[in-house]
């Protein structure tokens, strides 16, 4: 299960960053073209890619450790731990204003 979720996260990261599937970023596709122009979407997509890859890496490492220890019943802790680390990072960094383009300069 963890490996499947990790693969999905990796594919989502690739799709958003390199496939330019920006409509997968919540709220971006509902903005007007003028609002969209105020954001560095490539930077936001990089954050999404990095967060998805990071969560997938945590899941893969957790899966390997659990497999070595013979504790497969703790997979849900690894899944929710990865989400608990990755989602706040994703929300805080992508909404920080760092990727808003200042048109006054």
Image (spheres, helix red, strand yellow):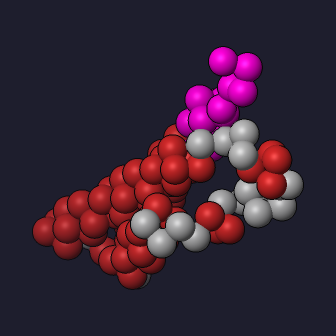
Question: Main SS type for the magenta part?
Answer: loop
Task: Judge whether residue 92 is colored magenta.
Answer: yes
How many numbered markers are drawn? 0
Name the residue located 28 percent from the left edge and 66 percent from the top edge. 60
Q: Quadrant of the C terminus?
A: top right
| Location of residue 40 by image quarter | top right
Task: Judge whether residue 32 is colored magenta.
Answer: no
| Residue 12 horizontal side relative to residue 34, left or right | left
Q: Quadrant of the N terminus?
A: bottom left
Q: Is residue 79 visible?
A: no
Name the residue located 73 percent from the left edge and 20 percent from the top edge. 104
Name the residue located 67 percent from the left edge and 42 percent from the top edge. 39
- Residue 6 location, x and y as percent? 38, 71
Name the residue located 52 percent from the left edge and 50 percent from the top edge. 42
- Residue 47 location, x and y as percent? 48, 47
Q: Is residue 24 visible?
A: yes
Residue span colored magenta? 90-105
- Residue 41 location, x and y as percent? 59, 49
Please, is residue 23 above or below residue 41 in the view?
A: below
Q: Give whichever of 76, 13 is nearer the camera.
A: 13
| Location of residue 96 by image quarter | top right
């Amino acid at each position: 299960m963890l490996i499947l979720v990790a693969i999905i996260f990796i594919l989502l990261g690739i799709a958003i960053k390199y496939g330019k599937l920006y409509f997968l970023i919540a709220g971006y596709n509902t903005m007007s073209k003028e609002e969209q122009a105020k954001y560095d979407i490539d930077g936001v997509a990089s954050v999404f890619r990095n967060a998805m890859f990071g969560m997938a890496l945590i899941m893969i490492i957790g899966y390997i450790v659990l497999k070595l220890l013979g504790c497969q019943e703790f997979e849900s802790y690894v899944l929710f731990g990865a989400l608990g680390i990755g989602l706040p990072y994703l929300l805080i960094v992508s909404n920080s204003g760092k990727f808003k383009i200042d048109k006054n300069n």
